[in-house]
Amino acid sequence: MKKMLSLAILCMALALPLMALADEEEVPSAKEISEAEGVPPVMPHAAPPLKNGSEEAACLACHEEGKNGAPQSPHAERRACTQCHVQGEIKEKHKKKGKR
């Protein structure tokens, strides 16, 4: 009888940590969050310095028409870009070969 009780206590002791792990929710990665439906994309670069005191001029200089490979803004009429878009992980600039 003591062996049975000891075995039952041991099983419960081993099962409790596993039950606690099962209740934990998985935290989504930054990539999963950025790709979520309805979430504005993050800026993969530092926010550009303001031109003429205007955020819109700084962002839309490239994004209004998609210059230099920048994605074209689907809503260029909205001028307060950083109201929705936040700075994400900053990608390093690629150095051009042969130039320093």
Image: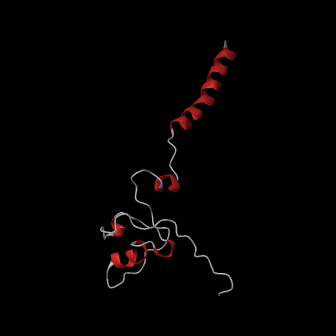
Nearer to us in this view, 92 or 60 = 60
Nearer to us in this view, 30 or 54 = 54
Q: Quadrant of residue 92?
A: bottom right
Q: Quadrant of the N terminus?
A: top right
- Image point (61%, 76%), residue name: 94
Nearer to us in this view, 77 or 26 = 77
- Vertical order, 10 against 20 (above or below): above
Q: Position of residue 70 (x, y in %)?
A: 48, 71
Q: Position of residue 30 (x, y in %)?
A: 51, 56
- Vertical order, 85 against 17 (above or below): below
- Image point (34%, 64%), residue name: 75
Q: Is residue 99 left or right of residue 71?
A: right
Q: Is residue 24 left or right of residue 3?
A: left
- Residue lying furthest bottom: 100
Q: Position of residue 57 (x, y in %)?
A: 35, 79
Nearer to us in this view, 81 or 74 = 74
Q: How many marks?
A: 0
- Image point (32%, 80%), residue name: 54
- Vertical order, 69 against 18 (above or below): below
- Image point (58%, 76%), residue name: 93
